[in-house]
Image (cartoon, rainbow, N blue to C red):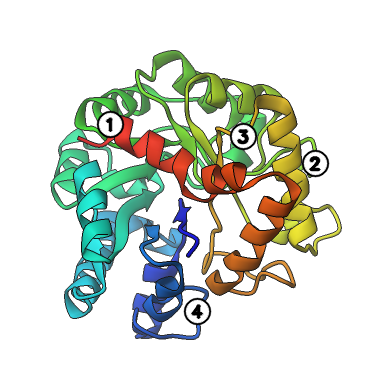
Amino acid sequence: MIRFVDGHCDTIVKMADHGEDLWENQRHIDIKRLQEFGNPLQFFAIWLDPRHYPISLHKTMEYIDFYYQQLKLYEEYIAPVYSYEDIQKNDVCGKISALLSLEGGEALEGSLSILRMYYRLGVRAMTLTWNYRNALADGVLESETGGGLTKFGKEVVQEMNNLGMIVDVSHISEKGFWDVEKIAEQPYIASHSNAKAICPAARNLTDEQIKVIARRGGVIGINLYPPFLSEANHASMEDVLQHIDHIIELVGDDYIGLGSDFDGIEHTPFDICHVSDYSVLFQKIEARYSKDTMEKIGHRNFLRVLKKILK
């Protein structure tokens, strides 16, 4: 049975907003389909629609409460991850692992104290920005201003390193990316980003960014949103494989993972409609490269980073 780690989905937010259930739903991910992969590890992101920014902390807490209600309902099948030992324990118990993340520093409302409280609530990763400017940095769609990390943003990165939280540079401006590189003391990830050399979307990474993430021992999670895979605005598994090909040619196979963005994207590649379709993707990666490479991309690369950072 193929195992995987997926570094990003928006399933919790979509379910909470529509009154749905994690056991079985019409979204891209649910427990029934995750069980097809034995003991996968899924990052569950809390993303805030910009309309909620005036009540960022309040809304984030509501989503976190919903997340834990769902885990409690199905604790026989899924359990939260706070440390690397929790992943190992869940494997022994035959449970899915769930890692809580934040997508955008808006949720901090400008406070390191709130960051520390999120850590106490189980948040173990954070994407520093969404697409736009916040108190930490400029997002990727603000790049024309040349803005990077703010003073507060630098303090956040340093405190995340101290706490044992994973710094995620997906969505950040290029200047912000290089600011993270200057001050980060731990590996960092791009949880759901692709290669700009294959598809020049603003959200994708340049070759130099890919190289430095690899040099730092991080991971790039391949995003399944067709506009980030192909300029044609539609995509297939072959497009996913082309991004993998490029990154492997550039830095090898130790720095690639999965970062689907399931339930946060408007449409998917036509032959990857939901999480169950990962099984076919893994078969194609193994046939194209090797079982070893497939396992690295599927779970081992992300697990290496989790083992190093989580305390």
The answer to whether residue 201 is visible is no
Which label was assigned to residue 97? none
Q: Tell me whether circle 4 and circle 2 mark residues in contact (CB < 8 Å).
A: no
Name which residue type carries label 1: Met
Name the one closer to the observer, 300 or 144: 300
Read off the residue under disc 1. 160
Name which residue type carries label 3: Asp
Name the one closer to the observer, 106 or 31: 31
State how far apart marks 3 and 4 are (Cα).
Answer: 30 Å
Read off the residue under disc 4. 27
- Depth-wise, is mark 3 or mark 1 nearer the camera? 3
Name which residue type carries label 4: Arg
Q: Tell me whether circle 3 and circle 2 mark residues in contact (CB < 8 Å).
A: no
Read off the residue under disc 3. 253
Badge 4 or badge 1: first in the primary sequence: 4
Badge 4 or badge 2: first in the primary sequence: 4
Q: Indicate the secondary structure of the residue bearing disc 4.
A: loop
